[in-house]
Amino acid sequence: MSWRFIDTHCHFDFPPFAGDEVASIARAADAGVEGIIVPAIAARYFDRVCDLAQQHGALYAALGLHPIVIEEHADESLQQLERALAARPEKVVAIGEIGLDLYREDPQFDRQQWLLDAQLALAKRFNLPVILHSRRTHDTLAMHLKRHDLPRRGVVHGFAGSLQQAQRFVELGYCIGVGGTITYPRASKTRNVMAQLPLSALLLETDAPDMPLNGFQGQPNRPERAAQVFETLCELRPEAPEAIAGALLENTRRLFAL
């Protein structure tokens, strides 16, 4: 049985895909991955991500300012984001990758939260969903999302928190991104979360070239490996594979209006 997938999170504007787009898209398609959402992480990538989406039918763009490179984001970056969204590029389907991160030294957390709030306000204004990054910040992020009450909601990508934290996001109307972490047998907490959440809340993603799957450590991750994430998810869930594949596709199309 051949399934169809959309990789809802792939940094396709980075190596090893940059300069190898046509072959990489074909490899993904061979594995059933027929669409790829490419989130930008800083203003200097906006044009490139939009150009990629224009040039390739399988690609969609998201524009956002990522907390991990907080020092790159000047006030002007926010204005660039606003201008880019106001131009309404047809294949921009979300604001992302945005969010909060307490992983690095000197995270500038107050500024991160200010920048997140500003981008959530833009999501409301332009009626777009958000693609959210969260490391060690789930409870704070949930508080911001509750306060902004976005009409289109979004997805918390690469989720590795507790079941209770995931359920809170789902109760707020957000989807949860399922990625390569579940392919590691030792990641029992995340595997357990993805087994128990409602199927209607799950999206498939790779975060390529980051987050390599089990067995591919040390190699760049790739969008076609979304198919292997799906296979692992089928092992963890009670539903039939066709029900899981259908739900993942439907959830993605509904959230991003594809």
Image: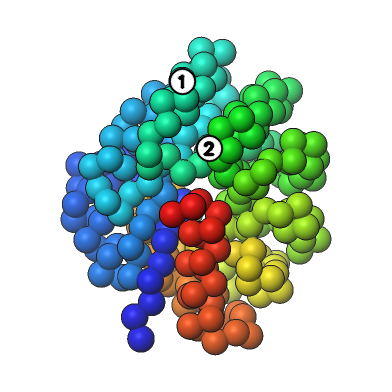
The residue tagged with tag 1: helix, strand or loop? helix
Amino acid type shown at disc 1: Arg
Q: Which image quarter holds the N terminus?
A: bottom left
Amino acid type shown at disc 2: Ile
The reply to whether residue 35 is in sight is yes
The residue tagged with tag 2: helix, strand or loop? strand
Q: Position of residue 18 (x, y in %)?
A: 25, 41
Q: Position of residue 23 (x, y in %)?
A: 18, 55
Location of residue 181 with respect to 47 vertically, above or below: below
Label 1, residues with CA under 10 Å away: few <14, some 14-19, many ≥20: few
Q: Which residue corresponds to mark 1?
A: 83
Q: In which quarter of the image is residue 52?
A: top left
Q: Quadrant of residue 140?
A: top right
Q: Nearer the viewer, residue 100 or 199?
A: 199
Q: Residue at x 60, y 84 (%)?
A: 239
Location of residue 67 with respect to 2 vertically, above or below: above
Q: Which of 180 and 186 is in front in this view?
A: 180
**Left or right, 220 with reference to 251:** left
Q: Which residue corresponds to mark 2?
A: 95
